[in-house]
Amino acid sequence: MVVARGLRKSFGSFEAVRGIDVEVRRGEAFGFLGPNGAGKSSTMRMVAAVSPPSGGELRVLDLDPAQHGSAIRGRLGVCPQEDTLDTELTVRENLLIYGRYFGIPRREVARRADELLGFFQLGEKRDAKVEDLSGGMKRRLTIARSLINDPELLLLDEPTTGLDPQARHLLWDKLFRLKQQGVTLVLTTHYMDEAEQLCDRLVVMDGGLIVAEGSPLQLIREHATREVAELRFPVGEHTALADRVADLAERVEVLPDRLLLYTHDGEEALARVHERGLAPVAVLSRRATLEDVFLRLTGRTLVD
Amino acid sequence: MSDPTERVAGRAPLDTATPEVVEPGVAAMLGRQLDYWWTVFRRTWKGSVVSYFLQPWLYIAAMGLLLGGYIDDASSGVGGAPTYLDFIAPGLLAATAMQVATGEVMWPVMGALKWDKTYYGMIATPLRVVDIVAGHLAFAMFRVASAAVVFVLALAVIGIFSSPLGLLASLGSALLVGLAFATPVYAFSAGARSEQGFALIYRLGVMPMFLFSGAFFPVSNLSEPLEWMARLTPLWHGVELCRMGSLETWDSTAVVHVTYLLVLAALGCWFAVRRLRSRLVV
């Protein structure tokens, strides 16, 4: 669906994307993960055929975006980071008008609009003005709008940023269903739980480069341990105490407020900590998450 | 760190055999935007109807009839027109076309780029930059045309035109004036980061032209350098053209006026697409 090789994007002297290789396959959910400024959105805009690459090669739906941008965009759904809804129109009008831009006949657009309003639980709001909607509803409408042309590939740039937990879970459910229906998803996010929930495969970007690639599980296996034990001591003691537990874990990380012990068995590590007479204020044993991988790869001081 | 471009160069290029792709023309893309502009029209026509329908009558009454009464008492004919009303009617028509055209492509364009970001929604569809510009300009010209038709009909009612041909010539001239203003001002708006520039356009462009480009008095009344400045403004060419139409006093200089306005419109189009592209496709 998307193939990029050595893809670059510069704005003046600033290189937002510094040569990345990506391949997105039909039917999968593919994630770009990274901190702000990692080059995710620049990459998405190039894939969306609204931003000419500065270097490298890019094929989207087997077409060259520089030559066939319009044709590519006709087969894409794009949910931008910022809503671009027409706030003075009603919910349904936004869908109808957008569908017309794709050259879909009016009757067909109306049918799809009603279907999408149902799917995204916006039926009751169909005649409400967009400016009266909540943030979560606007987001759902933006995604509904991006599906009006029945796209083969759906691009979502930070789809749930700024939403409350209920709204996020509702959106995840909808996106998961779309995936089940065979829609290829490409999304960017800096939420690890979102990436773990939705992505079959993902790349971690940092400073315009890809620093890791794989399924969420693979990444955790490669870049973290199975479990993490967290130890919380009084502020200021963490650095000194790190040495005393260094041999209990494969890796110990010192944070300002706690120590992280990367280990196969969190409970076991905690027990050993207690055996040594250390008395943390609070402890937690948990599974390693993509967040651990992410923070390790994209920066935070580490004590290996 | 290795240079990624070197890695690309070292590998076989991506398959570049492209299936035949036929893109719709601008006219087809304009059709796709019809529903959008129709909703814009439905929600804004009430606000504009007052200014379109009332304003011509106010100007005609105040300046043409009341002020004109004094002027006509003191002189016999102004700038080749039998009465002051005959003189300023086509001037006001051209000035109205200018004002409607510029108003339609300043704040609405800024809104579509900065506030509502509707252009960013549009460019994510098969619409291209040129289609978006064409759609917005077409709507602006529709507004100009509505205002001009209303104005021309009002003028016809008070007997300004001696023949239908004069009416049509004036109307056509007004449309040309609208186009010559809409396209360069659109280009300005498409690149503007804030709306502050619009006040400048009004104060340094629209208002001075409105007052001094021959709509209200012959520019020959100005001192020579100012007269030449006035003759360089697009509105002067538009006013002259509209006046030739309504008074039916055509001569070969009409070609100069039409050419000037057409060239300005064409340059405006080119810049408009260019500047909007540098905004939307980055």
Image (spheres, coloured by chain):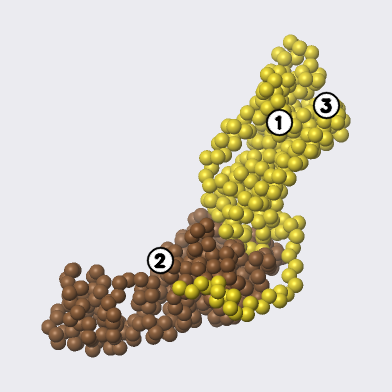
Q: Nearer the viewer, mark 3 or mark 1?
A: 1
Q: Which residue lies at the image location 17% right of the left edge and 72% below the top edge?
A: A237
Q: Position of residue B255 (x, y in %)?
A: 83, 35
Which chain does brown denote in the image? A
| Distance from Cα at disc 2 to Cα at disc 1 | 59 Å
At 28% from the left and 88% from the top, the residue drawn is A265
Q: Provide residue A146's location: percent of width, then percent of height.
A: 58, 67
Q: Residue furthest left?
A: A277
SS class, disc 3 = helix
Rendered hue of chain B is: yellow
Residue hosting label 2: A164
Q: Which residue is mark 1?
A: B232
Q: Which residue position holds label 3? A: B247
Looking at the picture, which amino acid does disc 2 mark?
Asp
Residue A201 appears in the figure: yes
Chain of the residue displaying label 3: B
Mark 3 against mark 2, which lies toward the viewer?
Answer: 3
- Quadrant assignment for the N terminus of chain B: bottom left
Image position of B252 (left or right of A245):
right
Looking at the rendered structure, the kind of residue marked 3 is Leu
Q: Is residue B68 above or below residue A230?
A: above
Which numbered disc, 3 or 1, marks the residue that appears first in the sequence? Answer: 1
Contact check, label 3 and label 1, Cβ < 8 Å: no
Residue at the image position 52 percent from the left and 40 percent from the top: B196
Looking at the rendered structure, the kind of residue marked 1 is Leu
Give the residue displayed 30% in from the left and 75% down from the top: A302
